Image (tube, rainbow, N blue to C red):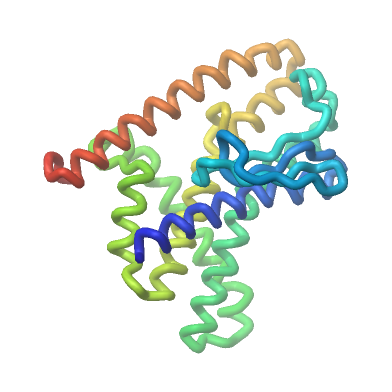
Amino acid sequence: MTYIMVILLICFLIFIHELGHFLAAKVSGIPIARFSIGFGPVLFSRKIKGTEYCISIFPLGGYVMPDGINELDDLYSIPLKKRLFYTLGGPLSNILFALFGFLLLNLIAGNISLYSIVIDPVRQTLLVMYQIFNSIGLIFKHANQLSGIIGIVTQGSEIVGMSFTRLINFGILMSVNFAVFNLLPLPPLDGGSIMIYLLGRINSKLLKIHIPLAITGWVLLLGLMLYATVLDIARISGGLTA
């Protein structure tokens, strides 16, 4: 049961991230052709006011596809401020979820005051972000402690148990992790897109490196995911200790 709860939580956090991109696009006036929860073959879709809303077969992912963006030139024709706001929408939505999570925990604990409702959630979220940023460098020193989705679900179910407050705490941690990870300056992550946008503002010729950088980024990410998955399987089978 706890495994299912953790998987559903991760799917919800991904939905929150993609919803952030979607809402930012709407606010910026960027038309959206497709809003998909999950990736791969589409299981269900419905078109509403020009946007196709989809549920795809692999739930641990998702994407927002702007309408009329068939070439990179189309994407870069959108004003820089709108592109930046659209791209930052995902990480910002994850941070807002963390703020709400800390607010909810404070209310559950009976801490009802202006400080606990307004200031403390911000302080707590910034502290978690700081801790995660600091831990990024440790990946290279302790690569054998990496976890993929299998490890996250396994460890998360052990941490959460059947406790609602632990589930919220785990959701906060994962949500901030999503935000920080996506802000890394590595294409095809949000931070990588922002980096390319800013480089293009300095010199438009630098936009030509977007595709090779994105391909390189995908190769690195897929390699990292595969490596982490192998470590997860080894831990579960008892062949590796963290």
Between residues 80 and 115, which one lies in front from this camera angle? 80
Question: Which of the image's four quarters has the N terminus?
Answer: bottom left
Q: Residue at x 68, y 51 (%)?
A: 19
| Quadrant in which residue 201 is drawn | top right
Question: Which of the image's four quarters has the C terminus?
Answer: top left
Residue 100 appearing in the image: yes
Q: Is residue 149 left or right of residue 236?
A: right
Q: Is residue 75 left or right of residue 92?
A: right
x and y, in percent, of residue 69 in the image: 79, 26
Q: Residue at x 58, y 35 (%)?
A: 41
x and y, in percent, of residue 229 in the image: 31, 37
| Quadrant in which residue 57 is drawn | top right
Q: Residue at x 24, y 40 (%)?
A: 233
x and y, in percent, of residue 217 in the image: 50, 23
Residue 128 appearing in the image: no
What is the tally of numbered marks visible in this picture? 0
